[in-house]
Image: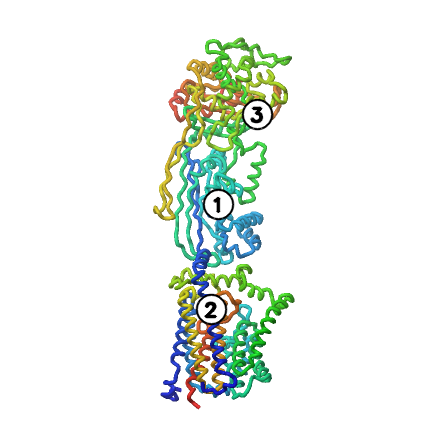
Amino acid sequence: MVAIIEKRDLRDFDWLTTVLAIAIACFGIWQIRNALPAESYWTKQIVGLGIALFAFFVVVFSDYRRIIELAPFFYAFGLLLLALVLTPLGVEVNGQQAWLKLPVIGQFQPSEFMKVPTVLMLARYFGKKRAGALTLREALVGGAIMAGPIGLIMLEPDAGQAITYFPILAAAFFLSGIKLRYVIGAMLLAAIMVPAAWMIGVKTGKIKKYQQERIMAVIDPESVDPRGFGYHTIQSIITVGKGGLSGIKGDTDTSQSVLKFLPEPQTDFIFAVTAENTGFIGCISLLLAYALLISRLVAGARESNDRAGMLVIMSFATAMAFQIFMNAGMALGFLPVIGVPLPLMSAGLSAILTTFIAMGFVVSIKLRRFVN
Amino acid sequence: MKLNESTQNVPVRITTIQIVAFVLLTILGVRLYYLQIVQGEYWSERAENQRVRFIPIPAPRGAILDRNGKILVDSRPTYNVVLSNEPLKKIDVTERIPEYSKGLNLEPDIVLERLNLIKKQNEFEMLVLKESATMQDIAWVESHSLEFPELRIELQPQRFYPHGTMLAHVVGYVGEISPKQLESEPYKSRGLRPGDIIGKGGLEQSYDEHLRGRPGYRKVIVDSRGRVQSEIEVVRPQSGQDLISTIDLDLQIAAEQQLANSPTKRGTIVAMDPNNGEIFALASAPSFDPNVFTQGSKTPEGRKQIAAYWQDEKRPLYNRAIQGNYPPGSTWKIPESMGALQQGVITVKNSNMACGGGITIGNKFTRCMGSHGSPPLSYAITKSCDGYYYRLGLKMKIEGLIQMIETFDFDKRSGIDIPNEKISQTPKSWKPAIEKREGRWSDIRTVYASIGQDTVVVTPISMLRAVSSIGVKGRMYVPHLMKEFKPIGAMGEEGTSGFFGERQGFTFDRPDPKMIPMTPEQEKVMVDGMWGVVQGGGTAGSIRIPGFDIAGKTGTAQVASLGKDVGAKKDHAWFVSFAPAYAPEISIIALIENVGFGGSFAAPAAKGVYQAYIAKKHPELLQALPESTAKPGEAVD
């Protein structure tokens, strides 16, 4: 592969994006260590980052257009893995059968990886040159592409992971010329339907007690069952607030995560750990780094050679932005507790590998922006 | 932008997505600012509150010693199973009841009671679930530490009463403060908390503040399940001050033995130093075991035993010396005679009064036990002539008797330094009620009152105090059991939160004695009469100890209506005395319930204590004595 890297490649390689992503991932490893210094999550994450970087470079130096052509195969393979999760090969953790355990490869989360083929599949379909606004037919096909993975993920059930797919479709529709009146209409409809669905769901019992509590915990965490979701939310808020301006400066002996007040500190609540350890300064720096990264992606999308490449980058950028918002919003106690990892930060091989594969496409697309 | 698709406004749409992403990140930043900068201190404090715990280290109570330094009460370390509050807040405690009661061998209702108590106390983190844990209990708690993180084993000092029932009424006992006591003075202002151990009854209660130490604490960091992770600070407790009591254990043992050997095994013996009010011995029988209260209050057997004490009709919890009101019978004649001399009803030179074998009031004849002619005062005392006192009482009038009652403080508490002392009931307190009911105070009541019956009931301690004053020129002291408190050194570093200042030692703050006005001649005639009771052929001649003259007075107080002598309602036997007669070192009162003559039962009991005193203070007297004279002799009234 090295042989095919040309001088031009090195000149056009997006070093800043790459370094930024690696820097955030390293910052994440430090926070994983802060969360539970006595555990091995942070060393595993270093290994994970190494594997992710390898995958990243493989993707960077592959021609993304050819991979997009092959998208249906990846997509079908992804659906197969998601289906396998539901078989006895799947592993259940905390009531969710979201993991697949295969010999040699080990344990991984197909719902994380599936984002890549889904994005590619949508980019392949919506990436052709187009003249007018999004048609109903296109919308239905896009919805169908999305329905496969979301449907299988909901069967696990992993609502948090499923939700992260919606921004991808929304971005694809939006950039494929969906008429503004539909966008506004959809927003209005949501504004009416969501509360209505809540009322009906609670009354009919379709929304289960624990699901209601998750929502109620956000509105008033102190009033909900202190053992349940309200407890998690409150503990996360305490952890964040405790960090203050500059954090606890390495005094991890009394940290909320070490004393086990904060649940899942290395994954779902890594942002709270960051807030406790590095304070407002650290968190704002992290958010600025994310903003810079997203800006780099958007810039790449603008420079993209073709629609498909633009769609791939914007889908990833949108998905990343929403995932950051959902994860941090949960840690900051204003969004319900759902298991969405913080991109590049949360411990977990599947998540970091998927993110770096996505970054690989972004850099690959930028690399080939002058190629035709 | 290379994509030429401006018809769809793609660049604008990309910018829109970028703006949305930035808005989302800005929302996060604003929320962060609010939580970390605006509310940072509040959350930091909450985090600290949930991880920092104060585990109290109980302070050992001061020991109680006798006047010679022998241990009367001390504390010994025991392992207790302790409940923490924090982990229990998050669970339904009723699930724990069967587990605890099985694992620790406790009654479910006791477990429920303890759990409810700790649930109610939000601020206080621990409560004893089981005292004196066995090795099995400790092993069970340790092996279930993951399941029940709220349980801990703590080494705590427990009050121990090595002498059991002996001295129980003097020392009292300790127990957990009750919710009612927590709300009331003087405990409220002392900052006591639920689960704190306080003195209940006796010296434990009177001097609780000095005996109680100042508890320390361990400031620790706990995890979310309440398990201790590390220690931040330890403040060592300061022990309570040791109390040296006035009790002489040897005399106490003698007094207890005398009561145990008495026919009814009910009564009281008090020995006191008439020169200052220090009590050498105070026994009241039947008694109770204070260890039952300190160790048994959380076990069903212990609770049954405590309930049995309360229900026992012999009333073992009741301190007969200070709470019993008994008709004093002829012992009453001592203060009465002194009162008559003071009031000039009789004089030293002219104290004769007719015996007449009795007296007729209206158409009712009340007899004397003998026929004594027209005796002078000292002879009347020696022989306990009722006829003499019927007439003396009538001559003094009820007003004179009441004046005497006031002189000798029979209308007040003696002021002894243990709680719940009762006041004697005398004509002073009865007269208004009787006059209201019967229209007048009749002479027959004066006659009965003059021999310590009917409207006269007194506490043994008040009688001892009054009679003791006669041998010491009228100095009537407040009886007391506290002699001295030992100092205790300062603990911790000065200026830190863990500093406890030194507590000074101090002795009993003795009030000035009440002076009973009497001339040396009056005193002599009184003591002569009392001397005669033992040495001059009087009613207690049987207890004579050669070389050690006792001045005393017997009493045989009728309990059933006058003149009858039925079964369990036999007379109370009294003997009140001091010795040596003309230079008293010790005064003793003995009261044996429902046995009969004072000279036959109470006086020999007092003698037993005198013998213990002699063995200790005047051993040369014992060596000089031939064996035969020490045996108890025959009895008259």
CA–CA distance in space, label 1 to label 3: 45 Å
Same chain for mark 1 and mark 2? The answer is yes
Vertical placement of residue A141 versus B430, above or below: below
Look at mark 1 in the image and give the residue it sits on: B193
Q: Residue A8, located in which quarter of the rendered image?
A: bottom left
Q: Secondary structure at mark 2?
A: helix
Mark closer to the observer (1, 2): 2
Q: Secondary structure at mark 3?
A: loop
Measuring from the top left, give residue A45's x and y in whole percent: 42, 72
Number of residues whose C-alpha sits closer than 10 Å to that of mark 2, classed few (under 14), some (14–19) or many (20 or more): many
Q: Which mark is residue B594?
A: 3
User: Which subunit holds the residue at mark 3?
Assistant: B
Q: Amino acid at mark 2?
A: Leu
The answer to the question of whether label 1 and label 2 lie on touching residues, with beta carbons closer than 8 A, is no
Q: Secondary structure at mark 1?
A: loop
Vertical placement of residue B332 versus A70, above or below: above
CA–CA distance in space, label 1 to label 2: 45 Å
